[in-house]
Image (cartoon, rainbow, N blue to C red):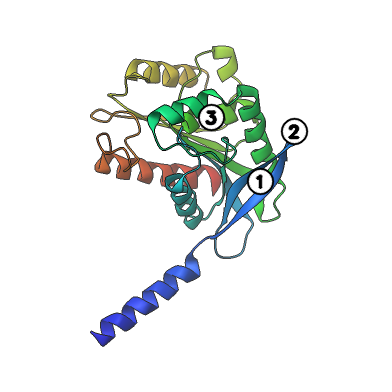
Amino acid sequence: MKKACVLTFVFLIACAAFAADSKTVSYKSGDETVQGQLYTPAGKGPFPALIVIHEWWGLNDWVKEQASKLADQGYVTLAVDLYRGKVATTPEMAHEIMRGVPEDRAQRDLHAAFVFLSAQPDVKKDRIGSIGWCMGGGYSLDVALQEPTLAAAVINYGHLATDTEALKKIHAPILGLFGGKDHGIPPEDVKKFGATLDQLGKKIDIKIYDDAGHAFENPSNKDGYRADDAADAWSRTVTFLADSLKK
């Protein structure tokens, strides 16, 4: 028993040594000052970086956990707060807060996040990507549309752009992860989106999980969470980001 306790203690110390550093940061978005949660990997940089964009719930613990896990993969991660500190606890509240976010303000906040990361001395300026889920998945695509030097974008069941002229602006490789039973983003739309980007010569990788619905990666979605699909999506994300941002 004593040996087991010692081994557990050593394991916890080792985990702490490799844990990402976390702090709240403030930066300018137009005339406003906004906040986000910044995670920095252990070790010596500079590192690639990611803008991490929350679901319609807001910047809650699950999104922060994803940002921390990605930092453990070797990325400086900035979990943005598009809701200015509000976090929803019911779908009705989430819908209300989401509808109250001006589109131009959200776009400005995301650009500000990109500028903030670009200015960090421990960040590789040409290796910044974006990732988001649900509402944040759509915004991850928007970052790719508005930031010509973005190096990668992961869209987890987010809204999709359909205008060919707009999609021509994308230079970053895209990973899209979707549920085949997502009624808000049907597979037909996902396939059309992927085909359009493919025809435009863009780098696009789409995975549709046939038995999954919306938000299948989040365990808080008790009825819709799909553990196996979520694990596969995470594995694909880790591989895609490493190929796009670390090579």
> Which amino acid is tagged 3?
Tyr
Residue 217 location, x and y as percent?
34, 39
- Residue at mark 2 to residue at mark 3: CA–CA distance: 18 Å
Q: Find residue 164 and name its label.
A: none
> Which amino acid is tagged 2?
Gly
Residue 112 location, x and y as percent?
68, 37
Q: Which residue is mark 3?
A: 139
Residue 32 location, x and y as percent?
73, 36
Q: Which residue is mark 1?
A: 117
Q: Helix, strand or loop at disc 2?
A: loop
Residue at point 29% right, 28% down? 213
- Residue at mark 2 to residue at mark 1: CA–CA distance: 16 Å
Quadrant of the frame with the N terminus:
bottom left
Q: Is residue 118 above or below residue 18?
A: above
Q: Which residue is mark 2?
A: 30
Q: Is residue 92 above or below residue 20?
A: above
Q: From the viewer's perspective, tell me whether residue 119 is left or right of residue 145.
A: right
Q: Helix, strand or loop at disc 3?
A: helix
